[in-house]
Image (tube, rainbow, N blue to C red):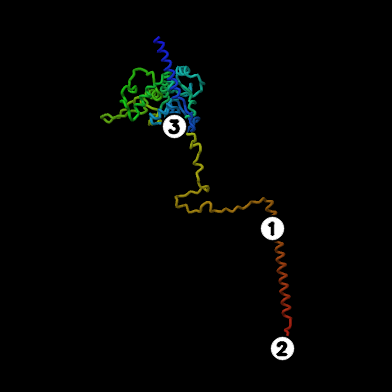
Amino acid sequence: MESRSLNILSKLSNSIWDRIVEWLITNRDDPQMPLSDFDRLRYEIRPGDVILVEGRSPVSEIIKTITLSNWTHSAIYIGRLHNIDDPALREFIQKFYSGEPDDQLIIESQLGDGTIVDSIRKYNEDHLRICRPTSLTRSDAQKVISYAVNRLGTNYNVRQIFDLARFLFPYALLPRRWRSSLFEHNAGTPTHTVCSTMMAEAFASIHYPILPVLHRNENGQLIMYKRNTQLITPRDFDYSPYFDVIKYPILDFDELAIYRKMPWGKEGIVLNDERDLTMPAPHTIKKTVVPKLDTEETSAQTKVDSKSLRKAAIKSEEKISASHFTSQNNAVHTTHEPDLPIKRNE
C-alpha cells in the first residue's frame, strides 16, 4: 500500500515537473526578424564550430538574467554524417537521429531532453552566432566531436542551473560555495550536464583553452590552468580570445556594395587636397545640346538655305537700284528748276 502511494506521488510529481519544463522551454513569438542570415551561416559553418543561440523561451530569459548576456544556449556543429571519420560514431549517432543522411547536425544539452543530436534547421528563426576555435586542426576537431557524440543520452543538470544562478548573483543569502554542485568533484563521467559545460569538457579533453586561469610563478614563467567547466556559460565562447566570432548579418555590407553608391565625382577628377576645390559647382554649369540631323535632312536643309539666300540677295539688289534711280531723278529736277522772283507787297 505504501509503495503504491509512493508510486502515485512519483507520477504526480513527474507530471507536474513535465508541465513546468514544457512551459519553460516553449519559445514565445518574437516580432523581430532574425538578425543573422541563416542560409549563409549554414553554408559557411564547419565541424567543430560552436553555435550561440539567443533563446526566446522563459528559461532563456532566466539565463539572460543570470549570465547578463543575450546568448542563452550553445551547441556544437558536427557536420553531416559523412563528415565524421569514425564509422562507429556514425552508427551510434543514427541511434539518436532518424533524419536524412545529408542533414547538418548539432549536438546540444537542453532542459527536458538532455544531450541530443538534432538538425541545425531547428534554429532557422533565431539569432545565431558562430564561435570558431582558432587554428583547430581537423584531427582535434574530430576528437571534440567524438567527445560530444559519446555524451548523447546524458540527462540535463537542472540543479547546476540553480547553483550557477546562486553563484553569479551579486548578493546571496547563503554562501555561494556552500552545498553547491559546481564545486563537487565526481570521479568518472558525470551523468548530468548543461549545454556549455558539455562543450567546455569536449574542448578541455584536447587541452584547448576557453577562458583559462593564468598565473606566473616565482621565475616569471606563465602557467595556464583549466577553468572549472561547470562555471562556463555560453557568453564565455563569445568572450574567449581563442575563438573567432563570425557573423553573417541578414543585410551584408559586402553584398550590398554600398560604397559604390557614394556620391563620387562623375568626371574622374583627382584632387590633391581641399584647396583644389575651386571649380564651379556641378549644377551651375550649363551644357548646350546640339541636335544631330540625319545626312539627308542636313543636305535638304542646306539646299533650302542656299535658295533663300539667293532670293534675299536679288531683292536686296533690286531695292538698291530702285533707290539709286530715285535719287538721280530728284537731283535732275533740282538742278534745272529756275529760280522764281519773290514778289513783295508794296
* Front residue (pair 236, 299): 236
Dot 3 lies on which element? strand
Q: Are marks 2 and 3 in contact (CB under 8 Å)?
A: no
* Front residue (pair 300, 43): 43
- Identified by mark 3, the residue type is Ile
Which residue in the protein does label 2 denote? Answer: 345
Name the residue located 60 percent from the left edge and 52 percent from the top edge: 289
Q: Which mark is residue 246?
A: 3
Q: Nearer the viewer, mark 2 or mark 3?
A: 2
Name the residue located 72 percent from the left edge and 79 percent from the top edge: 334
Dot 2 lies on which element? loop
- Identified by mark 1, the residue type is Asp
Q: CA distance from mark 2 to mark 3?
A: 129 Å
Identify whether 29 is placed above or below 299.
above
- Quadrant of the rendering where the C terminus is positioned: bottom right
- Identified by mark 2, the residue type is Asn
The 10 Å Cα crowd at callout 3, few under 14, some 14 to 19, many 20 or more, is some
Q: CA distance from mark 1 to mark 3?
A: 75 Å
In the drawing, does residue 337 fall left or right of residue 51?
right
Which residue in the protein does label 1 denote? Answer: 305
Dot 1 lies on which element? helix
In the drawing, does residue 170 fall left or right of residue 13?
left
